[in-house]
Amino acid sequence: MLIVRTKMKIILFFSLASCGVALTALAAAPKIDPTLQAQVESEAASIISSIDSVQTTHRGGRSKYWQALATHSTPPDNGKVVTADKLAATAGGAGNASWSDKGFTFSGGTRSAYRVDEYISTLGPGYVIFQTVISGTSTFTRALNHGPEDRAFDWTEKVSVR
Amino acid sequence: MRRRFSALVPLIAVLLGLSDPSMADGGFIRRGNVTGANPLFTSLVACYKLDEASGTRADSSGNGYTLTDNNTVTQNTGIIGSAGQFTKANSEYLSKSSVTNLQITGDTTLSGWFYLDSENALDSQVIVAKATSYPTTSDYVLTFQLNVTTRTVLFRIYHSGGNATATYTIGTSAITGAWHYVIARYRASDGKMTIKYDAQTEATSTESSTPMATTGAFEIGAFGAADAFMDGRIDVVKKWTRYLSDAEEVLDFNGGVGVDCPN
């Protein structure tokens, strides 16, 4: 009986210890401010819908989707509405169009920055919409995938290699 | 008679197992002959020639870890054949979703060739990485960096809550417009990390913690799809699940001309 109790204590100790490690790891990962998250996700809904519509039209007769560079040179921070200053920028190469070329004005500015990557995989073409915002002093990005690869991820802190 | 014998020499070499014409280098690396399978390719789990003009890029290791093309990586002259041409301003990179062989779960070696079109102060240009975000889904990165005036190549391994880095300092002169080789190793038994640039003396460090093995994507030319894009060319990228010997590092550099992937 004593042995069983001792074993249970040991198991309990290691269970609590492993929970502690997991909680420490979770605590180390910064999270996007929930109010800001709600704001930028609400803002994104109509923009994403517009991008999807543009991509459907763009793809007709082409082998790949439209690529768009980041809308802002610096992502908006902490809910500030910032004018998109890179709408005329285009990815190099023939036939690439800017946000402006595709009819996006983002009038009045946005609370987050947007970028679209196109990809060609063995399963076919697709695109990923990246939405980026600064929360506190950390930069957070989420990826919304439209295509055959599993490329989506929820809000995660993005840091430089440095 | 002498001419006939000369013509028979390659055939005799094959019959005696002294060379293998089916291999990329004909079974010879420089003047060193290799019998049977090239031992340099033992435990080679991914190898990218990057000879394709566009679209997906094939893995020549036999594992089929084909790379997805993101934002139209183009083609240029390589150290061997052609290379991937990456344009930083376009956020171009190649990627493969995570598989165990591309993680660091034991001894590991990574090597590749890069050719910079530009250098940007306070910026990194990644040769190869496996990362999505920090600290939850980053495994490792092999990259060129220009701090303010100092050029380095570094090999960083991420662990829970931090990382360990082996850094080789190249110097203060620009290295654009030429091919450079980098090879990095990790030995699980003692955490030893090394990085070697061209034929220079290697730099070392120690990873005392267990490396992260995450679901982050394997990428050539970017870090987490959002940072440190390469502005230049990358060619012949290899990953092994073993710690290459010092002699094998020299073999893979091959006097500055490289060794191609298996066919």
Image (cartoon, coloured by chain):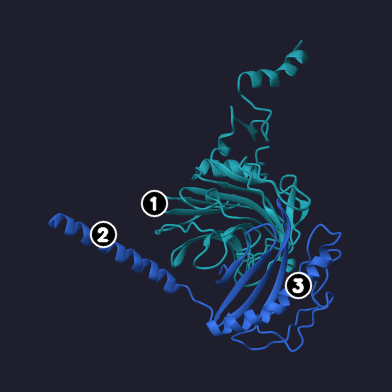
Q: Along the line of sight, which residue is nearer the eye, A52 or A31?
A: A52
Q: Which residue is mark 2?
A: A11
Which quarter shows the C terminus of chain A? bottom right
Q: Position of residue A61 (x, y in %)?
A: 86, 59
Q: Is residue B252 above or below residue A9?
A: above
Mark 2 crowd level (few <14, some 14–19, many ≥20, 10 Å Cα): few
- For residue B190, the mark is 1
Residue positioned most to the front = A1
Q: Position of residue B209 (x, y in %)?
A: 40, 59
Q: CA distance from mark 2 to mark 3?
A: 53 Å
Which chain: blue? A
- Comparing marks 1 and 3, which lies closer to the viewer? 3
- For residue A156, the mark is none
Query: In the displayed structure, does residue A87 sit left or right of residue B204?
Result: right
Q: Which residue is mark 3?
A: A51
Residue at 78% x, 79% y: name it: A87
Q: CA distance from mark 1 to mark 3?
A: 50 Å
The amino acid sitting under disc 1 is: Asp
Quarter of image, res B225: bottom right
Mark 3 crowd level (few <14, some 14–19, many ≥20, 10 Å Cα): some
Q: Along the line of sight, which residue is nearer the eye, B231 or A5?
A: A5
**Do the numbered discs 2 and 3 sit on residues whose CB atoms are within 8 Å?**
no
The amino acid sitting under disc 2 is: Ile
The amino acid sitting under disc 3 is: Ile
Which quarter shows the N terminus of chain A? bottom left
Q: Position of residue B193 (x, y in %)?
A: 47, 54
* SS category of the residue bearing label 1: loop
Q: Is residue B2 above or below residue B127?
A: above
Residue at 63% x, 76% y: name it: A132
Mark 1 crowd level (few <14, some 14–19, many ≥20, 10 Å Cα): few
Disc nearer the start of the sequence (2/3): 2
